[in-house]
Image (spheres, rainbow, N blue to C red):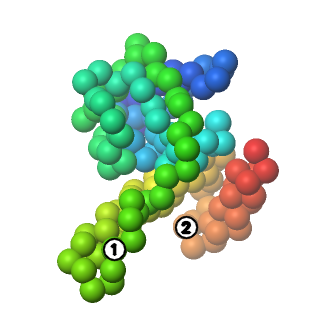
Amino acid sequence: NMHDDALVLQVRYEKTTHLIDLSMSCSVAALQTRVFLKTKVVPLRQKIIGFKGITGALPPAATMSEIKASGSLKLMLLQMPEKPLLEKCPDANSPEFAIAVRTALSVMQAYTAAAQEVLEAASQEAGGDEDETTGSPDDQELLQKIAET
């Protein structure tokens, strides 16, 4: 069923156009994770422009179908300056504190889930039929490869 809604996005960064394989049900966070693996630009510093009708930041949890992604779009990646997850650090006793922490957490969770998704897809492509419990050494290897790229 992954293949019914297969999607290949063209993302231009500096002078290179990268082809990113996704499905319409993939999240923005998954797209950004794959873009990171090809460009080394971390998700929080990515600004991907070219989606119709979207100004500002792409919501990490939104799916490709929700943002009307299509292979015909010419997307462009800009690397933004380092931006903290929290705009300002609220006082622990202030009502904004819980909201700020929840916001930061939801962003981090979106990227963690996306990284997991990308890892699983990669191990399937590598013909990973090993049962889940023994999958961790392979994940370590994959993370090692990611770190080296």
**Depth order, front residue of 64/25:** 64
Under mark 1, the amino acid is: Pro
Side of 53 where 126 appears, left or right: right
Q: Position of residue 30 (x, y in %)?
A: 45, 45
Name the residue furthest left: 95
Vertical side of 55 occupied by 58: above or below: below
Q: Is residue 120 visible?
A: no
The earlier-in-sequence mark between 1 and 2 is 1
Please name the residue that numbered disc 1 is placed on: 90
User: What is the spatial separation of the Cα atoms under label 1 and label 2, in whole angstroms?
Assistant: 41 Å
Side of 42 where 62 appears, left or right: left
**Depth order, front residue of 114/15:** 15
Q: Quadrant of residue 64?
A: top left
**Depth order, front residue of 52/6:** 52
Q: Residue at x 64, y 36 (%)?
A: 38
Q: Residue at x 33, y 36 (%)?
A: 56
Under mark 2, the amino acid is: Glu
Please name the residue that numbered disc 2 is placed on: 132
Q: Tally the numbered discs.
A: 2
Q: Residue at x 56, y 22 (%)?
A: 12
Q: Position of residue 83 (x, y in %)?
A: 49, 52
Q: Secondary structure at mark 2?
A: helix
Name the residue furthest right: 148
